[in-house]
Amino acid sequence: MKNGISILICTHNSSRLIEKTLSHLLKQKVSPSIPWEIILVDNACTDGTAQIVESFWKSDIPLKIIYEPKPGVAYARVSGMNACQYEYIAFIDDDNWVEENWVETAFNAMQAHPDASAIGGPSEAVFESTAPEWFARYSQNYAVGEQYYKSGEIIELNKLLWGAGLVLRKEAWDYLYDHGYEPIHESRKGKNLYSGEESEILLLFKLMGLTLYYDPELKIKHFMTTNRLNWKYYLNLKKSFGASSIYLDIYKNVIRQLQEEEQRVSTHWQNELFKSLIAVLKDPIALLAGMLNVKQGNFRIAKAYFNLGRLIQKFNLGAEYDILQDFLYNKYAPLNLALKTINPSQTN
């Protein structure tokens, strides 16, 4: 594996944002001893993003554009990571800005933790227009703020890291990909606000016995466009989080059973659907308030939309919910068994 760090930017129709993101990368002060590159994935762009990037990037640092025609950041990241040549891969979204020492800080953080498969850090919001009063309460849903209160290893299965500013060890990714990894849900594409593509990967890293770290020095700025700063957008985001949580819950249950060698237990989709229906029916007034766009910032409304997203996704999956449980268990059980005797950090 080549010494150095690859910056991976996945973008869909970000012609309005991409120059600002790249301008911060142009200002990087990186030691000559640290090779680095930028891999930009054009994910089905129709607004000329790639042409803007080609015209704007004037640097000796290599910038390679690859094309992923299948819409969805999950697919873009797979293609992008496979194109990266260096031992570390850093995710910078097309609305992330980094300080002039960020690339070297990310490299040094991974060097300082040779057991880490991934490291993440905090982010600070930069607003295109005035933030609503309720934003601070829900800022973490926008990947803004401190992810954890202190640096160190992230042990609990439910504790993961944001994709924005995440740094991965390519060797761990290659091992996972070579053993058949593919995302089980589409994640964010176009107006679809699903999320969790990095969470799938991080959960499987945990299954592989690998370590995640949080480093508060690994700071980024996250640009908040005006269209994201309204209550209807946030409720749509929250509903999408609910939908995405279904897939992550399946992962967590499967991983817990594999790690703890519990007896295989599947939950039936109809039972799961009923649970979500009950959760939604507990607070119909909150759903109505959300539809009428009143009581902005209300926690009950946000929770109701999260539960609604879970209900809709379970209904859409139907019997496929049960199939996914068995698929993931059977797919990754051999990997988990092999890793009882193999250290993936030492496996090419």
Image (spheres, helix red, strand yellow):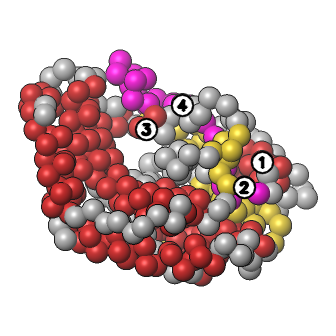
Q: Work out whether residue 108 or residue 39 is closer to the camera in this orientation and state it.
A: 108
Contact flag, marks 1 and 2 (Cβ < 8 Å): yes
- For badge 3, the amino acid type reads Tyr
Q: What span is in magenta?
A: 115-139
Q: Secondary structure at mark 1?
A: helix
Q: Position of residue 134 (x, y in %)?
A: 34, 21
Q: Earlier in the sequence, mark 2 or mark 4?
A: 2
* Residue 292 visible in the snapshot: no
Pointer 1 residue:
109
Q: Quadrant of the C terminus?
A: bottom right
Q: Position of residue 255 (x, y in %)?
A: 48, 62
Distance from Cα at disc 1 to Cα at disc 2? 9 Å
Residue 276 inside the magenta-drawn segment? no
Q: Residue at x 31, y 56 (%)?
A: 246
Whether residue 305 is situated above or below residue 258 in the rendered picture: above
Whether residue 331 is situated above or below residue 265 in the rendered picture: below
Closer to the eye: label 1 or 3: 1
Distance from Cα at disc 2 to Cα at disc 4? 22 Å
Closer to the eye: label 1 or 2: 2
Contact flag, marks 4 and 1 (Cβ < 8 Å): no
Q: Earlier in the sequence, mark 4 or mark 1?
A: 1
Pointer 3 residue:
142
Which quadrant would residue 303 be assigned to in this image? top left
Q: Secondary structure at mark 4?
A: loop
